[in-house]
Image (cartoon, grey):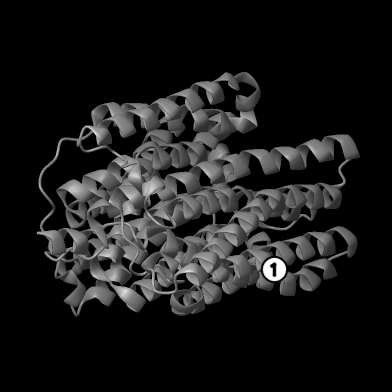
Amino acid sequence: MGGRAQAEERGGNPADTSEADPRRWKALSVTLVAGFMSLLDVTVVAVALPSMQRELHTSAPAIQWVVSGYALTFALVLVTAGRLGDALGRRRIFLMALTAFVLCSAAAGAAPNVTLLVVARLAQGVAAGCLAPQNSALIQQMFRGAERGRAFGLFGATVGVSSAVGPVVGGLVLTLAGGEDGWRWLFYLNVPVGALALILGVRLLPRVEPGRRERLDLPGVALLGTGVLAVMLPLVLAESGGVRRLWWLFLVGAALLVAFARWERRVGARDGQPLLDPRLVTSTRGYAAGAAIATLYFVGFSGVWLVFALFFQNGQGYSPLRSGLAVTPFALGSAAGAVVSGRLVERLGRLLTVCGLAGVLVGLGTAGAVLRLVPGGAAVWWAAPALLLGGLGSGCVISPNITMTLRDVPVRMAGAAGGALQTGQRLGGAVGTAALPGLFYMVLGHGGHHYRTALAVAIGSGLVPMLCAWGLAVYDWMRDRRAERRDPCAPEASHSHTHAGHG
């Protein structure tokens, strides 16, 4: 029993034979397609809000819920859905969530009024939040060793590219569909793609029995859900003055999240089954640092793209498609960097994240300076190499950080751990998408429509949390180096952390 328990704690459940499944790479492609759809829907709809508002004859605050409501419910269910996947089976939860996502996409496309559209989007966000943690958990379940690094590299590419290409895809679909109801195709396209992924998922995803049935930590679910809701609600309502009116919810949310942490420690101390085991943070090598790096990075990463869209469309008069194409070098660099870094993460470890964050800081900082100083349309071309560098750096941040954050998490806890990691990303993204556009508009209001100055200030502010993430990554890397020098044979001293234990 000792050897079996130790193997499970190191991420290699001996009862899990799916690692030898020759179809695992095909199964991974199915999960990545589903993940790409769910993450793309966070940003792709934003470019269509004006046409939705005109056709549905509604107000700007009401139509904003089409984007913010999806992001809100997406974040609310991540940890709980991951825990359900751990307990009931990731394949089962994945297929159920994908079915719901397809049906909600069809309902959103066919919605005759804004009320039904928002309801469909809220439900679609729940389905997407149930899908997301199963993706990372299935990677941990199906892959080991260097293969896991490559699989997480592809997963990281999916996360990074889906966020960056949303405006491009949205603008392209609107251009091809034409007409005021062209926005409906942003949802309808999910139906055939999702249906095909569902059929292939039934055939290819591994049939692994879940662990012993456990009772869900309902008090933990309530505390975490209400805490995340209290923190995110003012942010998703930021454009209608939510932060100013509902600032007190931040204090409520912080108190609820502290209560959640204390409750989880209490449940764990009594040998219960907490929703999110505190040992993930206290004893799992790399998890706490990786989750903090991801949260800080997404504050800047998510907000910068909205600022670019505002600058190009409102300040330069670009169409949604042209605006998206202007930042395409970043998306291309992100995809390439994520795939390459997936092959290097075993050898370089946290150093890869350090170098990637440096590339993002230099690339985005240079792009902001170029767009501020170079006049006319030539600025976009001069900024392209800097955006490409930033994208390459981003690919070396998201993908390796996911790998190193989740690598030593026991497979039995993979869903909850992945859900918590992505909850941090979504919270960081909510802060960034509220704060950076707000700062952009504030500079415009004080500077007499100086769009270039507003862009430079907003991008510079977005680089601050990224710089904090870089400092944390440097600290974590240097700690690894010191541990390796003290005891080169110790598992926790390894760059790759491949054999680090848990608890």
Whole-percent x, y for residue 494 in the image: 43, 71
Q: Depth check: 121 or 210 in front?
A: 210
Q: Secondary structure at mark 1?
A: helix
At a point 37% along the width and 68% down the height, the residue shown is 491
Looking at the image, is 73 positioned above or below residue 473?
above
Q: Which residue in the rendered view is the most extreme toward the front?
A: 486
Q: Depth check: 319 or 382 in front?
A: 382
Mark 1 lies on residue: 387
Asked which quadrant contains residue 19, the reply is: bottom left
Q: Quadrant of the N terminus?
A: bottom left
Q: Depth check: 424 or 495 in front?
A: 495
Asked which quadrant contains residue 278, the reply is: top left
Whole-percent x, y for residue 323 in the image: 68, 60
Q: How many marks?
A: 1
Looking at the image, is 122 positioned above or below residue 484?
above
At a point 22% along the width and 44% down the height, the residue shown is 84
Would residue 215 appear left or right of 221 to someone viewing this image? left
Would residue 360 appear left or right of 281 to someone viewing this image? right
Is residue 172 among what the camera can see?
no
Is residue 480 among what the camera can see?
yes
At a point 31% along the width and 60% down the height, the residue shown is 501
At a point 60% along the width and 58% down the height, the residue shown is 475
Whole-percent x, y for residue 184 in the image: 44, 50
Q: Residues within 10 Å of mark 1 (few under 14, many from 20)?
A: many
Whole-percent x, y for residue 459 in the image: 74, 52
